[in-house]
Image (cartoon, grey):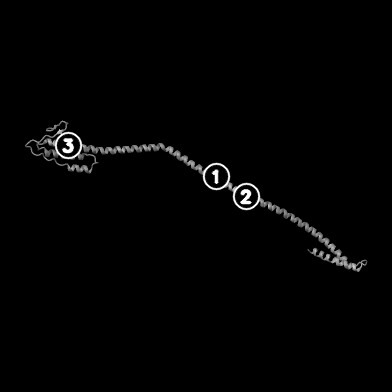
Amino acid sequence: MKGIQEGPSGQAQTPKKRKGQGAAPSVPKRQNVKKQQDSDDDAPVSQRHLKDLYQKLDSLIGSISSSSNITYFEAAVKVMLDTLVKEHAANLEKPNKAVENSTQSFKESTEKVDKLIIDAPAFMTDLRSAADSNVSNENKTSISYQITKLQEDLVVESKIMDELALKTTRVRVLSTKLTSANNEIVKLKSERAVMKRCMSDVNALLSNLIKAHDPMLPLTTCKDLAKKLCPIVAMLNRLEGV
């Protein structure tokens, strides 16, 4: 551009004002543009934004084209364009960072899912082993409990059988004794019948003897004999009536 000189460092320098030139025209402030950018920093630059920017640049160029200080205008435009480029680059960098973060998060999630898929068979195997072990332990516990209960029942049943055998033996002994007693009673009854018959015969003989009057025996002897035989006859009568 005309009127711009480069300094030793290669940067553009604005020439000094010449005498007789008026003050540089005022550059319209970019308050509206700045407000819009401040209010929506994360919004991407759209076609409408560029169109508004071009209109403002055209109005700015139109307002300054009549001025003799073109060099100052070019420097201001360059500064403004640099600022716009930096802001545009910053606006583009934010979504790029968001995309990178999202990509990294998706990559990490994918790695976790892949690891979970790889570890799933081993986890299921361990789970099945644990379940089988629990079932086996429960079965062993149940079988052991049933065996213990069966042994306890057998002990109780054995005691009952021992008591029953002892009672059966006692009943058999009592039955044998009862049979012997019955036999003894039958035997005694038979002997009693025989004794009754004998006592009846003896009683009859003694009664006849007492009542008899043998002329060969003296009267005193007969009385003494009757006196001795009467108690025996009375005792035989009592025994015969039993």
Residue 130: percent from left, percent from top: 47, 41
Q: Residue at 25% across / 37% down in the picture?
A: 93
N-terminal label among 2 and 1: 1
Q: Earlier in the sequence, mark 1 or mark 3?
A: 3
Residue at horizontal 56 percent and vertical 46 percent from the top: 148
Q: Quadrant of the C terminus?
A: bottom right
What residue does disc 2 label? 159
Of the residues under marks 3 and 2, which one precedes in the sequence? 3
> What residue is at 62 percent from the left and 50 percent from the top?
159
Q: Amino acid at mark 1?
A: Ser
Q: Which residue is mark 3?
A: 79
In this rendering, the answer to whether 238 lies above or below 17 is below
Question: Which kind of residue does numbered mark 2 sit on?
Answer: Lys
Q: Position of residue 83 (x, y in %)?
A: 19, 38
Q: Identify which residue, 19 or 118, lies in the foreground.
A: 19
**Mark 3 is on which residue type?**
Val
Which of the 4 quarters of the picture holds residue 84? Answer: top left
Secondary structure at numbered mark 1: helix
Picture quadrant where residue 16 is located: top left
> Is the Cβ of the residue at disc 2 closer than 8 Å to that at disc 1?
no
Residue under pointer 1: 144
Q: Name the quadrant containing residue 187.
A: bottom right
Query: Residue at left 45%, top 39%?
Result: 126
Q: Is residue 63 left or right of residue 233?
A: left
The residue positioned farthest toward the front in the image shown: 8
Element under disc 2: helix
In this rendering, is residue 33 above or below 12?
below
Q: Position of residue 221 (x, y in %)?
A: 90, 67
Pick the quarter of the image with the N terminus. top left
Task: Tell me: residue 218, above or below residue 84.
Answer: below
